[in-house]
Image (cartoon, helix red, strand yellow):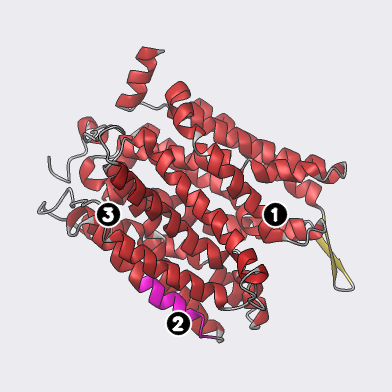
Amino acid sequence: MTSGRSTQTDLTYQPSKPSMSEMSMSVRIRLSLMMFFQFMLFAVFWSQLAAYLDKIGVVGLSKSLILSSMAIGCLASPIIGMIADRFFPSQKVLAVVNLLGAVFLAVAGLQSQPVTVFACLLAFMLCYMPTWGLTGAIAMSHSPADKFPQIRVFGSIGWWASGAFSLVAIKWLKVPAFDGTATPLFCGAAVSVVSALLALTLPNTEPPAKGQAMSVMDALGLRALSLMKDRNFAVFILISFLAMIPFTIYWSYCSVFLEAQGFKYITITMNWGQFAEMFLMLMVTVALTKMGVKWAMAAGLLAMVLRYVAFYLGGVYQIGWLYFIGILVHGVIFGFFFVGGQIYIARKAPKEIQAQAQGFIFLVTFGLGLLVGNFANGALIDHFTTSVNSVKTYDWASVWAITTGLTVALLALFLLLFKDDTPAATAHAKRS
């Protein structure tokens, strides 16, 4: 099979994978630790980055560009995926980008000028963001795709642990200041080094397309675009991209909303979403088995509708506990829709472009989708914001009503247009 083929057989090719019982406990532990540290190293500094930028005087366009470095970093995902697919074992690629990322993150912590902070964090993100797809490809190469959530859940645990670490640093380690300082950047760099060393202990994941003829699309890591010829895959990509617009208003702007509602410990409050995600992620496997990918992903979109209805009603009727419903369903949204999407990719993509395909979905969602969502939601919030004597008043009811309507429309389009036609879906239909 050549990399240039785009037949239906290629599109539904499924590499043989070990069952969970065949995977040793040692491999499972190392893959789980990979996820734990990979997400912890990002979360430990990202959630407080905006506050840190304010402290060092980075505002306006410079601040927006720095906060968009994550989305821009996703542009490298297909290219890094191509390198793992064709040239070097994936675990070694992961080790190199984590080590480089540690250097850039540490240097960023030493900077105070907006241009140099942006340059360092952009370089870090170009190394880091491809790891979300790369770690998924590594894990699913050594375990059944349907069992992937049982390993991926440790990423959620790592994310939550980063928030708990900030409290430990302040309360027990007596660090005088943590949030709003450069300390989290150095902590992230240290964890990145640990992740690089751990990557060298992971099971060997050889490049599946090594030695095959290359084209310009391969050089740019864009071979996964060939999957867009399949109608259902194209619908999946389009809905995933559009779903990032309502998702991003929570990801990037919920702190503004919570602050307007009088919350003081915003980072810890939002981390309850990751805490619930640790448990809800384990339900993804059950959902995939009982419902299939399409209905599991639909459940994720339905949870997003529930989030914004809760935010809307909580504000209109001044019911504070409804905000926590919107936060706690984060695990259903991320696990069922986005992780479910990764599993669909693993079933759909040929073996020789698995890493590229996983990088491609992160480019579409947390790259282009997040970037568009940041600007679109920023404009939406600004439209419903009034300022009198430098005091801002937000019309959050209108913001959440529009966001809810958009999410409902996306759910309807997904149910109407998407069909999961992978072999796993066919087997599930026969069992049903």
Q: Quadrant of the N terminus?
A: top left
Residue 393 appears in the picture as rendered: yes
Residue 104 forms part of the magenta stretch: yes
For marks 3 and 2 on the same chain, the one whose residue lies earlier in the sequence: 2
In the picture of the structure, the residue carrying the numbered disc 1 is 269
Report the span colored magenta: 100-111
Marks 1 and 3, Cα distance to the nearest angstrom? 34 Å
| Identity of the residue furthest to the front in this view | 172
Q: Secondary structure at mark 2?
A: helix
In screen coordinates, is 4 left or right of 339? left
In the picture of the structure, the residue carrying the numbered disc 2 is 107
Number of numbered tags placed on the structure image: 3
Marks 3 and 2, Cα distance to the nearest angstrom? 28 Å
Q: Quadrant of residue 256?
A: bottom right
In the picture of the structure, the residue carrying the numbered disc 3 is 202
Within 10 Å of the Cα at label 1, are there few (<14), some (14-19), or many (20+) other Cα atoms?
some
